[in-house]
Amino acid sequence: MTAAAPRRSAARGWVRSRLERATALMPRRSDWAQVHLRGDLTAGLMVGLVALPLALGFGVSSGVGAQAGLATAIVAGVVAAVFGGSRVQVSGPTGAMTVVLVPIIAAHGAGGVLVVGMMAGMLLLGLGYAGAGRVIRYVPVTVVEGFTVGIALIIALQQVPLALGVSGGEGKVIVVAARAVWAWGAGPVWAPVAVAAAVVVVSLGLSRLRPRVPGALIAVALVTVASGWIGLQIPTIGALPTGLPLPSLPVVPLADLQSLILPAVAVAALAALESLLSATVADGMSVGRRHDPDRELVGQGLANLAAPLFGGIPATAAIARTAVNIRSGASSRLAAVTHSLILLAATLLAARWVGMIPLAALAGVLIATAVHMVRVSSLRPLLRSSRGDAAVLVLTTVATVAFDLVTAVVVGLIVAGYIALRRTASAARLDEVPLDDTDHGSEERQLLDEHIVAYRLDGPLFFAAAHDFLLELTELTDVRVVVLRMSRVTAVDATGATVLGDTITQLEARGITVLLSGVRPTHLRVLHELGIQQHLAHERHLFDTTPEAIAHARVHAARVPHRPG
């Protein structure tokens, strides 16, 4: 066998493992084993009716147009349903994604946002194949809720100009909304306000009284008919193309590609976060169903590669539509595919009537959606649970509105991590414990024990707690031997081990011998790599059990007189 043979064998093994990984994330026949035709078709119809006004509204709100919202819901909805990791997830344009897209469109135009969508799709594919889907479990619920509330506030603020029938210009959503209110106050026009308010009231009322009825669609249909009958002169969606455009690659100048990288990362991060959160919610609503997070990222990546080819904006899974799908009886991917076909039928057969919908009505739909996103029943316990949790939730919400969604999540994770470290550090303890549970015996032994002290270390020995944790040891007096029981130490990092070594050195320099007992093998490896054992007076001053260490301490205390520091 030549020297190159092992390398060829390793290369073949690597290729084989990559192919097996790719195959595991692709659709398979078992995906359609749970189809219940009647339930899935009914659920798909219901979700399609709910999604129609939302797709139109999010398309308009993003700045690309209603047609882009429909194309996204149709194309991304089918692709994500077939290739995604959840059987009941429904994908399409969402309010959270719209918030991210508005500044991208303002800076790079519609072509730029289509390219961003495709770049984000490639990033999502890479994340899925890299196994990044399981990272979502490390995002605290307080960050998720704060992020959701912030998105809801932004969506509602974005609709203020349309609901008032005025222009607010460009800028931060709060500034734009304030300008719109000021402009409307200078010359109030009540028709758009009445239309938006009617849609909000009807949508929210029907969702409470008849949750399975598509209240938003009914509200939009009623105000559209009423405004046409009364003859209200308010802006409408306008003419829509019949059907989807032919697929084509979006084009932007090569010089702009570099400036689109960061927006693409932001879109991919949001798509991954929202899709995996939605899938987790779906698992909780449907007994016995668990999604594949890595395959879900792959499905969303393919959906975001496909949608821009038809003029669609970046997509993600939608929690609201997924919830409607499950409540309507969906049991397989057929329901989400049916939802997209319903939207395609509306585009082919009803484009003329869809174009007559007032923009203020779509603003009302999105305001009602924002209200639904803020779940007071979930927020109240989090705000009351602890000051730390309340702080994370509020800061994430404020950062979402003031900056952007990715920044908000990063801020929330940093604050949550800091609070978690504080709590973990405060749980670390150093307790003095008796040398044993038996009678001390002879008077000589009692005299020896007066110069021996044993401490039990509880909790983590790491950078956030180590200094305070071991400070008490350096202040010991009139002691010959210190026994440190480390069997209850849960974690040791480099900083904790280093501080332990410094503490041992200070005690040994004062003539106080230090013995360690019960060190776990994993922790012992850290101490060995950092040379902490060299700080001990003798390498045999490490003991498996505390009784062995105490017995040695008594022998040592009897043999070596104490040298006060």
Image (cartoon, grey):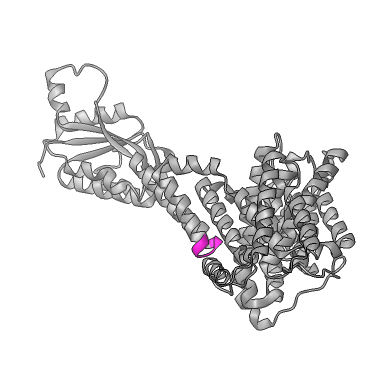
Asked if residue 23 can be seen in this view, the reply is: no
Specify whether residue 84 is painted magenta.
Answer: no
- The answer to which image quadrant residue 351 occupies is bottom right
Residue 81: where, in percent of width, then height? 78, 51
In the displayed structure, 198 sits above or below 428; it is below
On the image, the x and y values in percent for residue 510 come to 15, 45
Q: Say whether residue 50 is left or right of residue 275.
A: right
Residue visible at 21% across and 42% down in the picture:
472
- Quarter of the rendering containing residue 63: bottom right
Give the residue furthest to the front. Answer: 230
Q: Residue at x 48, y 60 (%)?
A: 399
Would you say residue 239 is visible in this rendering? yes
Is residue 162 positioned above or below 87 on the image?
Answer: below
Q: Nearer the viewer, residue 275 or 159?
A: 159
Depth check: give the residue in front, 70 or 560: 70
Give the overall secondary structure of the magenta segment: helix
Along the horizontal axis of the image, is 113 left or right of 243? left
Q: Residue 403 in magenta?
A: yes
Left or right: 508 as drawn, with respect to 111? left
Q: Identify the residue at image location x=60%, y=50%.
A: 371
Position of the N terminus, as image quadrant, is: bottom right
In what quadrant of the picture does the C terminus appear? top left
Up-down relation of residue 138 to residue 174 (above or below) = above
Q: Is 214 situated above or below 6?
A: above
Q: Which residues are magenta?
A: 401-406
Closer-to-camera residue (3/21): 21
Q: How many marks?
A: 0
x then y, percent, for residue 374: 57, 48
Q: Residue at x 22, y 41 (%)?
A: 473
Q: Position of residue 263 (x, y in %)?
A: 61, 69
